[in-house]
Image: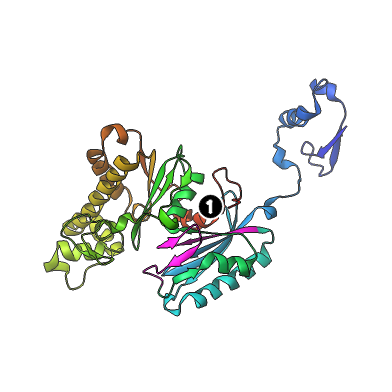
Amino acid sequence: MLVIPSVVEGSGKGVVLGAWAHWSLTGHSPRNLVTTLFKKLNFSPQTLSTPSTMSDSLILGFDIGGTKCAALVGDIHGTVLARREWPSIATRGPQAMLADFLAAAEALRDAHPGVKACGVSIGGPLDANEGVIYSPPNLPGWDAIPLKQQLQNTLGLPVFVEHDAAACAWAEYLWGQPRSTGNLIYITSGTGFGAGYILQGQIYRGAKGRSPEVGHARFAEDGPFAYEKKGSVEAFCSGASLSRLAAWKFPQRWSAQPPAGPELGKLAAAGDADASAVISLSAHATGQVCANLIDTFAPDVIVLGSLARHLGEVWIAQVKETCQREALPGLHELCLVRATSLDSRLQDCSTLAIALDASGQFRTS
């Protein structure tokens, strides 16, 4: 006989089911007997009260940015259980910033015991293999900081450090929809412009654990400056560069006080021709970069983040149109270009994904 929670009469007590013949259950093996009973009673196995394994599968996530920072606890499915966010005040330097993270981590772990690993997303340059940070432009004083080792010593956890674009790419690879079959590129176009590469089901890293910096590549001989290079990809394609792009494209109107990216987007949506031209220039440049990436890496998915969320379908459509026109047709038809499906959750999910392997289980190295 089998005791299960009663859901038939609403008694709230266990009910003993011994008359298997009533539903012709004789002859069923113990292995599938419970499943058959559930179907007959029309309720899900989740109705059973079973001990939760959630507390054994938790991840501590750190998102270290130049403007804001966040610490969170989530699970191996990308679900965030608790989160804290605060302004970076990056001019304080690395040790003061890390003290904020350690205080947040202590509170989060007290409330959610069972954390098994920590994932850290941070902008480059960095050595992701060793977890050493090398002077990101938005984090003054972070020069040759052995972040992985420092955090492992303090937290007593395995710590995995990853370039923020690569971390987002890995989150999209694990949880994004439609799924990639193994070769995915994520495009970030916020404060800077970068890409994370998943090749043959693994995060691609170059020499000494470095991530490629496509945003630093030259896009045009003329154009605004970004990261000390005139006409770079970042100067044409990043969200933060939209105001510089507006001042360069329409100096008589905007050289003195160009609109920021969000304001420019609102002007374009209201029908401002100049603002629309700037947005289109950014979209077409991004489409050309995507086409180059398709021709170079032959991915099956390119994911558009940042500006795709903020500027919407008009910008995305222009990116796709240019990409289709510029890429080799035989490679373009094999690649889906889409906006992030994780939306505003992506950055948080990326810190959790860093601690996981391709099967969604905890990394061992």
In x, y percent, where is residue 6? 80, 39
Question: How many neighbours does mark 1 have within 10 angstroms: few (below 14), some (14-19), or many (20 or more)?
Answer: many
Question: Mark 1 — residue?
Answer: 353
In x, y percent, where is residue 189? 34, 57
Image position of 141 (left or right of 292): right
In x, y percent, where is residue 53? 71, 50
Residue 30, located in which quarter of the rendered image?
top right
| Residue type, label 1 | Ala
Magenta-tinted stretch: 116-139
In x, y percent, where is residue 326? 23, 41
Query: Does 137 appear in magenta?
Result: yes
Query: Does 260 appear in magenta?
Result: no
Please tell me whether mark 1 sits on a helix, a strand or a loop: helix
Image point (77%, 32%), residue name: 34
Q: Nearer the viewer, residue 247 or 218?
A: 218
Q: Nearer the viewer, residue 358 or 114?
A: 358
Seen from this angle, which residue lies furthest left?
252
Q: Nearer the viewer, residue 192 or 125?
A: 125
Examine the rendering and report whether any part of residue 183 can be seen.
Answer: yes
